[in-house]
Amino acid sequence: MKISTKTRYGVRAMFELAKNYGSYPVSVKTIAQRQEIPLSYLEQILNHLHKAKLVRSVRGPGGGFLLAKRPEHIRIIDITHALEESIKPVFCVDEMAEEDQCKRMDGCVARLLWKKLDEKIKEVLEGTTLKDLCEWAKKFSSTVEHEFIFHI
Amino acid sequence: MKISTKTRYGVRAMFELAKNYGSYPVSVKTIAQRQEIPLSYLEQILNHLHKAKLVRSVRGPGGGFLLAKRPEHIRIIDITHALEESIKPVFCVDEMAEEDQCKRMDGCVARLLWKKLDEKIKEVLEGTTLKDLCEWAKKFSSTVEHEFIFHI
DNA sequence: GACAAAGTTGATTATTTTTATAAGCTTTAT
DNA sequence: ATAAAGCTTATAAAAATAATCAACTTTGTC
Ligand code: FES
Ligand code: FES
């Protein structure tokens, strides 16, 4: 039940863009430096986020990435969705799961358990947006002396 | 965010023992056959569950495993705890996490997010016991024609 | 137009974690 | 004594994850 490094990097990168929302593009290099993420890996990650239409890119000098939507319209689950095959704790909680891979799904007790779990996880990841993160960060920086930080 | 095969096997094995609670021991071989789990792997898993004092073993012919407590006193989280290093989505949600691995934890916004997630996950896994599974199974078998089954 | 600063893409490697197997041991009921 | 069980540790195999690399395209500026 671990969040992958890829997703963590992705959330951090998106947070970096959210902080900059409404301003000019941020280059991959800049994000990589600020968040201490391997540059080439971050490129891959941003490509995924691009394909998922969560970010917009501007090519050429002075270019970089921008959020494609307002921070309040980007949920954490959108990010995990773009970066992990699925956040489901077991594949068969999905209604679309193929019966033949998990026999007799309709009579399976385990499935009820994993479904409960899946719902709660979704609750959190669907219920939190980049704007929420930014607001938490503001609260932090007013009570703590140092700049808010975002890592792992 | 996947539940490991080891944990899934573990839950299934424990369910098998719960079904048999109050009766004679069930051998690893029997559990392996009923649940279609590789025998040697299951041995390892039961050893972990043994060390965590969730099961009792009886050696010699006719021996096998028994639940060490009543099904209502064994929560799913006890099982995951015995079989996974931790179910925490990121290590630093733990209050005991060492500061130097994740810098300035006190000013970290991500941590708030992962903590929220961790709490919800714990809610489900702490709130479900083996007895619950058995009861769900009973409900199933009275409405569905075939035996209840527990897999993945 | 030349150049450099960016993003784009796909392949490949490296690393880590997970899953599984195997072998040899100990205990104990009959 | 023997066979049916559990116990333990080492190792192999497989899969997933993380990271790197190289070659490419777009575009702003001088
Ligand atoms: S149907 Fe997938 S766990 Fe049983
Ligand atoms: S403290 Fe661990 S995510 Fe920031």
Image (tube, coloured by chain):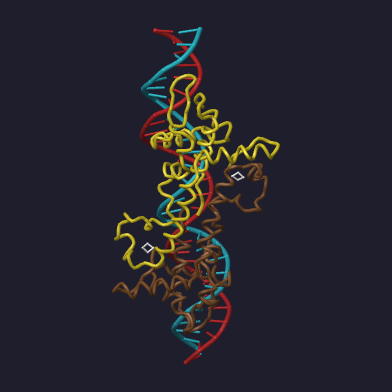
Chain colours: A yellow, B brown, C red, D cyan
x, y (%) of residue D23? 39, 25
Seen from the viewer's position, the closer of residues C9 and B74 is: B74
Q: Is residue D12 left or right of residue B88?
A: left
Q: Is residue A84 above or below residue C22?
A: above
Q: Is residue A64 above or below residue B24?
A: above
x, y (%) of residue D2? 46, 86
x, y (%) of residue D17? 48, 46
Q: Is residue A85 above or below residue C12?
A: below
State which quadrant residue A146 falls in: top right
x, y (%) of residue B92? 61, 49
Q: Is residue D27 above or below residue B68?
A: above
Q: Is residue A63 left or right of residue B105?
A: left
Quadrant containing the C terminus of chain A in the rendered view = top right
State which quadrant residue A105 falls in: bottom left
Count the labels in the image. 0
State which quadrant residue B53 falls in: bottom right
Q: Is residue A142 left or right of residue A83?
A: right
At a point 48% along the width and 48% down the height, the residue shown is A125
